[in-house]
Image: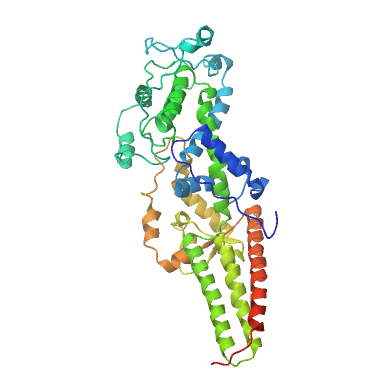
Amino acid sequence: MSLLFYRRPDFVAKLPGPMNLTQCQIYVERTQKHRRAIPPELSFENVIQNKALPPCTLQDFMDYLVYVSHDAENLQFWIWLQAYTRKFYASPPAEQALSPPWSAVEGLQPTGNDPNQPPRTAEKAKFGASQYEINFDQQDPPVTPAGHMSPQFDKQSFISGIANTTRTAAESVEDANAQAGLKWQSFTIQPHRSEINRVISHYLAPNSPRELNLSHKTRAAVLHALQHTTHPSAFSLVRDIVEGTLRGQSHPNFVRWSICNGNKPRVLFVRNASIAHVVGGFLLAILLILSSASRWWRLFCFPLFFLGLSAGVAAYKGLCVIVHTGHNRNLRPWEQFGDGASLNSFDNDDEATLSTDDVYSMSNRSGEKRGMFMDTFGTSNSYDHEPWVERYKKKPLLRRIFPKNMWVQDETIRILQDRIVWQSHAWSAMISVPLTVLIVALPKTGVL
């Protein structure tokens, strides 16, 4: 990685419409161009396996997807699928035999026959493959972006309804299958069928609490496969889409976000302060040029130029140079409020830095609140009802700009931040020195 030309991973914007394999391929192609920007220590595998330290742990990744990216359902489903795959292959062979692997040939469904009858097997399909296809002629229903419900859908009413109704996951599965045009019943004798029903009711059914942003065709294909088998291969299509999105879009954006050590108010403040320093340097230079003072007084413009440009370049990449001096980072808005004494003891010190013990104490207190997003079958990923949202809105602007800090534990992140700060110093010196030399060389006018 070059000192002067290192770049954070580029931001990968979400493509419009439901997720599909084509979009995932576009994500992968974009991220391949900037593979060197993500060190191996911060790879997708290390983050998912929780081998990285804060701020790049699996919980940090989940927090980013919940509070920033608003598509945590992808990671929640993917984590469940990994665990389910291990559990399925740990089952007795006799149980596994009840759920054979799913293949595209077995997914062919005869058209024109009774929809309540199971489709023919692959052995029969080879005699007339052209007659077998899944019926996707229905008009696609409107699909909302991942993590968001349709405007007519009340999230809170739906969540409370889950807790106060006798409606079962199996009934939700029946409704989902009916909307997909699949009318015959699943094989209930297969292992883990009840868990599969819960996954369908949480991630695949329309208007489910954590509905994946899938097209109607993809959803119907997966539901069709799950009618036949509970084998993990039935999820192969949605697995490829979700994993491709996580690897190609969510993970690079998460690493880019984790490198930043300042919250948005702090970064905006530093950017404006850097502009003020540069403008101040030019004003001082103009005054000294117009005056009869010695031209060597113009050297005092250099500190203003250097500090302003250095802080500005670093802030452009999300870093506050002052916070970086101790390898710290601002607490995220959802991390700033706790009930323990260790946090309250910092209330009168805006520049306080939490010690390691404070970090663990805060993590334990907030674990119950934030841990619900790690649950496979939790409620929706909405956080509007969390207490910190209202408290942060009421927080004075000055305390938003100067919040409490936390030490950056991951060494790789610290190295990348060091690289960016030194890069900002280098670029600042390369601009400030010639600019100052030019100002000193100008003749004085003596107007003032």
Measured as percent of width and height from the top left, residue 134 is found at 44, 18
Measured as percent of width and height from the top left, residue 182 is found at 39, 19
Residue 123 quadrant:
top right
Q: Give the answer, above or below, for where 331 lies relative to 379.
A: below
Camera-nearest residue between 117 and 279: 279
Q: Residue at x 53, y 78 (%)?
A: 280
* Left or right: where 48 falls relative to 159: right
Camera-nearest residue between 113 and 388: 113
Camera-nearest residue between 115 and 60: 115
Q: Give the answer, above or below, for where 374 lies relative to 315.
A: above
Q: Give the answer, above or below, for where 210 lies relative to 221.
A: below
* Res 323 visible: no
* Left or right: where 414 falls relative to 139: right
Residue 314 quadrant:
bottom right
Measured as percent of width and height from the top left, residue 60 is found at 53, 48
Camera-nearest residue between 201 and 343: 201
Q: Residue at x 60, y 64 (%)?
A: 324
* Res 211 visible: yes
